Image: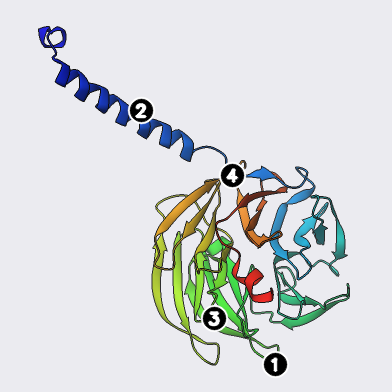
Amino acid sequence: MKYLVLMNSSSRLSYTILFGVLLMFQLQSCFSQRVQSVDFTEENSFTAGIEGPAVDHEGSLYAVNFGKDGTIGKVNTKGEGSVFVKLPGKSIGNGIRFDLDGNMFIADYIGHNVLQVKKDSTEIIVWAHNPNMNQPNDLAIAPNGTIYLSDPNWSENSGQIWMVNPSSEIVLLETDMGTTNGIEVSPDGQHLYVNESVQRNIWKYDITEDGQITDKTKFLVFADFGMDGMRCDEKGNLYVTRYDKGTVAIVSPEGNIIKEIRLKGKKPSNIAFGGKNGKTCFVTMADRGCFEVFEADHAGAYYKRIH
């Protein structure tokens, strides 16, 4: 061990630099694990079925299952929630989206419906129905108003994709898939993203002029944990909720992970953009029954579309 005692000044300098580099990597690792979100609503104000976050033209925030299943909750800018509507019969909502006219669309997975609540109304109508669907689970709306539906069969780890045409008919686009869950349309309306939660795949399709999908390619595969809802920002980056991992992965249009946002809870179920500049990300947390929020670098695609 004499070489340690006889270490010259050059060796000591190299050792100091090496120690500094290792310390820097440790600090970076600790920083990456730091929680980057805060609570927006009271914990357990929603049930474990909290899902479908969506922000309307006035900036109000909505999600399903406020207080009890079968409701749609409305949350003000202070994080205070109330029941907006109670869904009819045994219907329970999952995904929620707004069209450019401000009408709300709800994926009713019990009734195999797409429900609609018109702007400035609380009347609920069945916009589209197809008993051959497993659910549906989540929905996405293209810039031209076309609605796309994910439709998993959880017991068989399989799924489908559907489209609602201009006549309010639900049309099957693809079957024999994995557990289709999160679904989103790119800001330019040219691509559809669909993930398979159990298989951990995200697929990318081209959208044709008549709303059909083609040229299916594997966009991204995760090695672990699940996936749930997804939304795009104005730059086309895809925000993917990583169920059980407790993060939101931000993925570039080329399929590269830009960064991952660490959340307080472990089961994020979906995400929506809102706030004063459209950069606030509202994340529904199934294990905590509440919303967590963080600030993104870019505004949401839908926010930019309506402002």
Q: Which residue is mark 1?
A: 167
Tag 3: residue type? Gly
Distance Cα–Cα, label 2 vs label 4: 25 Å
Crowding at dot 4, Cα within 10 Å, few <14 / some 14-19 / many 20+, comes out as many
Distance Cα–Cα, label 3 vs label 1: 20 Å
Of 39 and 116, nearer the camera is 39
Tag 1: residue type? Ser
Looking at the image, tell me whether mark 3 or mark 1 is earlier in sequence order. 1
Distance Cα–Cα, label 1 vs label 4: 41 Å
Q: Position of residue 36 (x, y in %)?
A: 58, 43
**Which mark lies nearer to you, 2 or 1?**
2
Residue 135 appearing in the image: no
Q: Which residue is mark 3?
A: 189
Q: Which residue is mark 4?
A: 263
Crowding at dot 2, Cα within 10 Å, few <14 / some 14-19 / many 20+, comes out as few
Where is 224 relative to 253, above or below? Answer: above
Crowding at dot 3, Cα within 10 Å, few <14 / some 14-19 / many 20+, comes out as some
Q: Which mark is residue 23?
A: 2
